[in-house]
Image (cartoon, rainbow, N blue to C red):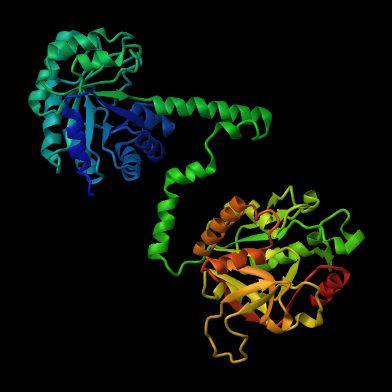
Amino acid sequence: MTLPRKTTRFRELLTAPTLGFLMEAHNGLSARVVEDAGFAGLWASGLSISAALGVRDRNEASWTQVLEVLEFMSDATTIPMLVDGDTGYGDFNTFRRLVKKLGQRQVAAVCIEDKLFPKTNSFLDGNQTLADIDEFCGKIKAGKDSQTDPDFSIIARIEALIAGHGMEEALKRAEAYHAAGADGILIHSKKSSAEEILHFAAAWGNRAPLVIVPTMYYLTPTDCYRQAGIALCIWANHNLRAALAAMREVSGRIFREQNLAGVEDYIASVSDVFDIAGEAELSAAEKRYRPGQRRTVRAVVLAASRGSQLAALTVDRPKCMLDVRGEPLLKRLVRSLTGAGIRGVTVVTGYRPEAVTLPDIDKITNTAHATTGEVASLACAGHTLDGECVVSYGDILFRDYILSALLNAAGDIVLAVDSGTPEGEIKRSPDLVRCTLPPSRDYLDDRPVELQFISSTLARDHACGEWIGLARLSEKGAALVRTELAAMEADGTLATASLPELFNRLVAKGHPPRIVYITGHWLDVNDAFGLARARNFL
C-alpha cells in the first residue's frame, strides 16, 4: 500500500480535531527511534541539530549544513517532519530557497520564528529583538509562493511572549501571520506555568491550528492542552538531552574503570544498532539484486571429545589440540575452512575447553560432553545454523579440493563420501553409507546421488563409501537441521544421538542429503597411528 505524501499526512495531523504530538530528533538514528516509538511526526529541532554538530544554536551551522542532516532524517523515516527553520536563515529570498530545498527532500513542513537573523535561542538571556511584522509577513508569503507541494505547511512561531512584548502583541502578530498565509501558529513561552499559553489559546479561538512547545511548563497536565484546543504539542529536545546524559555517564564510567564490563548491560547492543540502521533490508536487497555476490558461509566444528584412545597425549588437552608438525590439529582444520572463504568458525568444545586457545574462532562448550553425543554438541551451536554453513568433525584433515567440491555441489544438505579406502587405513567403526547410485569413474556422469542410509554397522559390501565427517548445509538445509534438532529434543533422542542418526532421520522424512564422492586425500585422528598419519599427510 502506498502511503499518502508526508506533506498530506502532516496537514492531517495539524488539522485533526484531537491533540497530536511531535517528538524531537536531530539525526537519522534518532529520527528512526522516534518513528519506531510510534510517533506520527518528527520535530527537527534547531537546538538539537546544532548541539549534535557541536555548535551553538545561533545559526553557526549554515542552512545548507542543516539541510544535509534533514535529508538523512527524511530518508531514514516514513513519518512527516516539521523542521525548525529558525528565522528562515535570512530574508525572504533565502527562505523561499529553503522551502524549495525542503520540498525536494520530502520535508512536510517548516516553522520560522519572528526574530532577527542570526537568531538567539529563546531560553537564553540576551538579544531577543523581534522582526518587523510586515517584513515577516512578506517572508511567509514568499515561502507559500515557493512551495511545490500544495500540502506543504509553514508554521509561524511567535516570540512576543518570550521577548516580553505581552499578550496583545502576540495576538496581533498571530492575526497578521495567519492572514499572510501561515498554516499554523506556534506560540512560545519560557515561563514554568502554561497560564499565558492557555490564555493565548482562549483568546485566539482556533482561527488557525495552534502549536505549543511545553519544555519549560512541563508539569502542566496534557489534558489541559486538549481542553484548550491545541493542535500539536512538540516534545522539543528530550532525545538530545537523554543522549547527552547517557553519553556522559557511559564515557565517564569507561574512563574511570578502564573496562567495558560495567556498562555493557546498560547500553544498546551492536545488533540493535545494525537493526535500526536497516541491515536486514540491505541483506534482502543483496539477495535480490546481487545474485553473484560472495557467499557468506559459516562453519561449526564439533571438537568436544577427549580422544581417549590417545591415552596420555590427551590428559591435559582434547585431541583437536594435539600437535601436528608444530601446530594444533584444530588450527590446521580452521585454516582449511577459512582458506575456502568461510567466515565465522564456531568450535564446540567439551573436554578441557580452556586448552582450546585459537584466536580466530568462537567457542561454545558442551558441558555435558561426557554423557552426550555429536548431535548434542551440534545443538549447542544450533543458533549459528541460520544460513549456509559447513559442519565438520574436529579431528579431520583434508585436501582443499574436497571442501571446494562440497561448497560447489548442488543440494540443501551435502555429505563428502570417500568411495575408496582412506590411504591404507583400516578402521573399526567408519560411518559407512549406502546411496542411490554407486560411485562412477566417469567424470561426465553428473547424475545426482542421494543418501539412503548411514551407519557404522552397515556391511562393507553393501556400502558405497565412508562419510568423512564433513557436510555442507544451505540456508534451507540449516533450517531443516534446526527443525530436526528440535524434534529430537522433544522425543528424547537428542542427547545420545550421532550425526549419522540425524541424517537417517532426515532421509526418513523425505530430505535425503546429496552425496559428493571423493577418493582419499583425507584422514581422521582417532589414535596414535592416526596422529602419525596426520604428520605424514602434511
Q: Between residue 377 and residue 272, name the one nearer to us.
A: 377
Count the marks.
Answer: 0
Vertical order, 36 against 373 (above or below)? above
Q: Between residue 178 and residue 115, name the one nearer to us.
A: 178
For this orientation, the residue located farthest to the right is: 312
Confirm whether residue 341 shows in the render: no
Horizontal side of residue 218 vs 296, given as left or right: left
Q: Which residue is drawn at 73% across and 54% down?
A: 372
**Quarter of the figure with residue 524:** bottom right
Residue 265: percent from left, percent from top: 59, 33
For this orientation, the residue located farthest to the front is: 491
Residue 423: percent from left, percent from top: 78, 82
Horizontal side of residue 57 vs 172, given as left or right: right
Task: Look at the image and tell me in which quarter the C terminus lies.
Answer: bottom right
**Quarter of the figure with residue 44:** top left
Q: Between residue 461 and residue 537, name the one nearer to us.
A: 461
Q: Which residue is drawn at 45% across and 70% down?
A: 292
Vertical order, 385 against 102 (above or below)? below
Residue 6: percent from left, percent from top: 22, 40
Q: Between residue 398 and residue 368, name the one nearer to us.
A: 368
Confirm whether residue 255 shows in the render: yes
Residue 459: percent from left, percent from top: 72, 79
